[in-house]
Structures are given as structure tokens and as C-alpha cells.
């Protein structure tokens, strides 16, 4: 490879190349999690696929470590890097919806709330993040939990194709017809195989009005409410996604609550019947469950995750949401000192769990409950306490752990040995494909899949 310099790349670069002294650098380097404070040597704010390819070639020529930013929402802060090159796709916001073919193509900097706004103009949607400010690329390549997954599968199950910039700077398309082995790998392989500059999705008829929202009860009733939630999950149809959360009221009272959320995407009459047990059980002290625009459902949790808040998360599948596990979760939240923190239970069932394990790289196919301990605070002085609380609750849950983890929730301090455990039987094939498409492990600032040695 010929020597590529910053000056050469800058001549034709459509976006901006930011160095530490440049205006806009500090804003561009910051990701959603305020706990992450990294300073790249260079930020390539890309406008086009060719910009991304040129940034990759520059990094290789200058021997720079690389991170890739799409939405910048990953809690581990993998979008940022110290001393290397941050390839920033945030300016790449193009979206094209084909309502007749029921497909959408969007660039790698698009957020779920942006994609949903465009697809919902046609009464269409695809499985996306439960938080609207999440980026489409990272969420999809790492799995893609969302409100529609019981009905339509994970986000990656709805991926038709992806345009990728590979480690050598080549631009390729991966699909079932083109480079099908690469397409298999990126559906769950995260950012290990290339940079997704655009993604094409299957769309489905959804909304624009669905049955959704939440109900809430005092934490004193949390044990009974979570048992009720567990039993409701066992009977849930593919039309309904369910989640529960131990939260603090947003009215300034400091009252701890237990909430149950649903998203029912079938007929509204069916949704009303499905919601009735949640609205009558207890009864709740807050009832905000009923007909709701799908775009609002997708943004229900956004205010609880403000950009710049300090975050430290741990997550694990539970072998079962047993009574003892519920008691442990409730006791853990009762000890929480920050009103911004939460413990969330995401239930997986339906279409997302019926995909054969070897059909994609993703192994998140087990029906059950994903427990997410979300420690969040605003004052840096609370960092030690915030991290300690999260780790303590996680440790207390260990007797209830299952074998599965969601890679998109792995923290910065958890990724080193996570790949082999989480990919399980798919890991050897992933290592072979890593050796084929990224033999030098250029893309390693991630939950890393190491290339198979020849």
C-alpha cells in the first residue's frame, strides 16, 4: 500500500478532518456515555462511503488505531479512542424508503428515531432499538433488541444487505447473494468485519398507532408485580413485546417504582384486550398504557437516557426469573442511591427465538429474560459509588445467571474474553471469516473476534 498522508486525503474529503485544536473537535469526540472521555488524534467526520474508505486507508498508512462511531450510544464507549483515528459516520443521514417493495436503506449515521420517522410515514417499520437515540448500525450488527422482535425477529434478522468498507479500504456489498459468508458474519459479528456505511432492511406494516406504554406500581409491590409480569410473559403472543423496570419516579419525589411496558402491534382491539390485565392488576398508581403512535413508543425511554449522563452497565441473561431472582433484583434496587439508575428486564420470545443458531452469527436465540443493571448518575463525584452499586447487584445475581449475554450491553471492561463465550458454536467459523476478511485484526476496538491462525 502506498503512503497516504493527511494532506492527500484532505484534498478530496467531503466531510471534516478534525484535530484536537480544531473547532468542533470536543463536541465530535464525545459519545452518549459521559463516563467515556477519550481524545482521538484525528476525527474523520465522513459524509460519503468514499470518505470512510479514505479514512481507513489513512489509518493503515499512518499505523493508527481505529474506532468507528455510528450513533455513539454504545455504553462501553467503543466509538471513541485515545490517540487513534475516530471514523465518525454521524453526518451520514441519508434514508430512502421504498413503500411498495417494503424496504428501506439508511446510512450508517442514522438513529432509530430518524429511520422510524421516515418509515412510519408509510405505516411501515422494522425492529429497532427500544431507545430512539440509538444508532442503527451498531445495534443491528450486534443483534438488535427492539419492540418488534417477537413479531419480526431481531434487527439483524431484518437486514437485507449492507454496504461495507473492509479493512483494506475496499467497498463491498454483503447479502444472501453477494458475499453470503460475510453477510452471515456481520449479522451478530458487530464491527469485526468492516464499517457499515449503509444498511438495507425489510419493512413490515406497523401502526402508525399501536397499543403500548407503561403502568407503574410502588416498589413495595415489586415482588408481586414482577411475578405477574413473569406469568404474563409466559402467555405472550408474537404480537406483544414486554419489559419491566425498577425505576425512580420522574416527579422529583424520589419514589421508587416498578413499571411494566408493552408494545402490541396486532389489531388495536386485540391490543386493548392484551393490555387490560396490566391496567387492572394492582391497580397501578400510574397508567399510561393504551393506543400510542409507534414513533412515541420508540421514544418512551429516551428521556431516561440523556446524552452526557455518566453510565456503567452490566447485563446477563437469567436462567429463569425465579422468585429468588426477583427478590435479589428488588433488594438491589432498594439499595440504589441514584434516581437516574434502573434495573430493566427485557423478555425475548417469538420470532427472535425461532431462528436456528447457525443461521446468523448471533446466538441470542434463547427465550427468557435479559437483566440489565443500568447505573447512571450526573455528578462525577458519584462515579465510584455508581460503579460499585452496579457491580454489587451483578455479583448478587450470579446464582441466577444463564449462559447468554447481549454483546451490545457489554461494558468497556468486559469485552476482552467475551467473544468466545458468547458466540459459542459459531465462534470457530467467525474466526475463519475474520482471517479471510480482516487477517491483521485491523478492526479490533470491539468485542473482538481474533483471526484464525493459518
Image: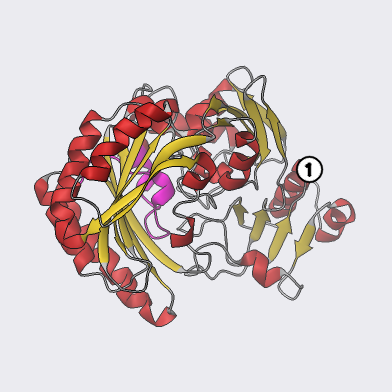
Color style of the picture: secondary structure
445 lies left or right of 13:
left
Where is residue 181? Give x, y as percent.
Answer: 54, 23
Where is residue 327? Give x, y as percent.
Answer: 12, 55
Instruction: Confirm whether residue 121 shows in the render.
Output: yes
Q: Which residue is most to the top?
A: 177
Count every numbered label the image shows and give the total: 1
Secondary structure beneath label 1:
helix
Q: Which residue is most to the left?
A: 324
Q: Which residue is most to the right?
A: 11
367 lies left or right of 180:
left
Give the labeled residue for mark 1: 50
194, 228: nearer the viewer: 228
Instruction: Confirm whether residue 194 shows in the render.
Output: no
Picture residue at 27% right of the left edge, 44% below the top: 279
Residue 341, image quadrant: bottom left
Picture residue at 83% right of the left edge, 51% below the top: 14
Amino acid at each position: 500500500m502506498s503512503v497516504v498522508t493527511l494532506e492527500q486525503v484532505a484534498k478530496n474529503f467531503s466531510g471534516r478532518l478534525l484535530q484536537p485544536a480544531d473547532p468542533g473537535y470536543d463536541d465530535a469526540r464525545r459519545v452518549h456515555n459521559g463516563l467515556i472521555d477519550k481524545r482521538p488524534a484525528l476525527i474523520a467526520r465522513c459524509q460519503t462511503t468514499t470518505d470512510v474508505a479514505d479514512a481507513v486507508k489513512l489509518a493503515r498508512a499512518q499505523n493508527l488505531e481505529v474506532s468507528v462511531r455510528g450513533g455513539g450510544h454504545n455504553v462501553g464507549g467503543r466509538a471513541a479512542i485515545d490517540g487513534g483515528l475516530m471514523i465518525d459516520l454521524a453526518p451520514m443521514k441519508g434514508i430512502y424508503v421504498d413503500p411498495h417493495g417494503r424496504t428501506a436503506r439508511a446510512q450508517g449515521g442514522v438513529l432509530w428515531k430518524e429511520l422510524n420517522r421516515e418509515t412510519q410515514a408509510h405505516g411501515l417499520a422494522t425492529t429497532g432499538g427500544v431507545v430512539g437515540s440509538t444508532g442503527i448500525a451498531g445495534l443491528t450488527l450486534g443483534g438488535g433488541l427492539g419492540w418488534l422482535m417477537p413479531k419480526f425477529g431481531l434487527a439483524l434478522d431484518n437486514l437485507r444487505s449492507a454496504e461495507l468498507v473492509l479493512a483494506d479500504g475496499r467497498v463491498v456489498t454483503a447479502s444472501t447473494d453477494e458475499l453470503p459468508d460475510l453477510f452471515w458474519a456481520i449479522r451478530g459479528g458487530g464491527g469485526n468485519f468492516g464499517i457499515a456505511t449503509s444498511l438495507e432492511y425489510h419493512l413490515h406494516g406497523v401502526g402508525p398507532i399501536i397499543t403500548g406504554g407503561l403502568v407503574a406500581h410502588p416498589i413495595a409491590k415489586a415482588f408481586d408485580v414482577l411475578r405477574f409480569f413473569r406469568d404474563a410473559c409466559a402467555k405472550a403472543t408474537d404480537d406483544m413485546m414486554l419489559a419491566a423496570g425498577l425505576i425512580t419516579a420522574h416527579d422529583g419525589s424520589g419514589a421508587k417504582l416498578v413499571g411494566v411496558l408493552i408494545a402490541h402491534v396486532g389489531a388495536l382491539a386485540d391490543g386493548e384486550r392484551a393490555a387490560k390485565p396490566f391496567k387492572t392488576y394492582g391497580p397501578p398508581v400510574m397508567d399510561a398504557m393504551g393506543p400510542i403512535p409507534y414513533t412515541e413508543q420508540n421514544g418512551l425511554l429516551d428521556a431516561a437516557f440523556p446524552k452526557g449522563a455518566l453510565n456503567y452497565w452490566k447485563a446477563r441473561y437469567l436462567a429463569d426469573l425465579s422468585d429468588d431472582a426477583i427478590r435479589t433484583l428488588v433488594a438491589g434496587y432498594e439499595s440504589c442511591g441514584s434516581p437516574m439508575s434502573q434495573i430493566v428486564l427485557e423478555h425475548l420470545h417469538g420470532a427472535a427465538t425461532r431462528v436456528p443458531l447457525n443461521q446468523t452469527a448471533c446466538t441470542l436465540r434463547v427465550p427468557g429474560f435479559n437483566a440489565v443493571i443500568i447505573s447512571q448518575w450526573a455528578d462525577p463525584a458519584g462515579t465510584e459509588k455508581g460503579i460499585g452499586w452496579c457491580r454489587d447487584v451483578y455479583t448478587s445475581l450470579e446464582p441466577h445467571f444463564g449462559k447468554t449475554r447481549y454483546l451490545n450491553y457489554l461494558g468497556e471492561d468486559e469485552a476482552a474474553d467475551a467473544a468466545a463465550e458468547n458466540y459459542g458454536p459459531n465462534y470457530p467459523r467467525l474466526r475463519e471469516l475474520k482471517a479471510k476478511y480482516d487477517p491483521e485484526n485491523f478492526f479490533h476496538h470491539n468485542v473482538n473476534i481474533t483471526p484464525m491462525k493459518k
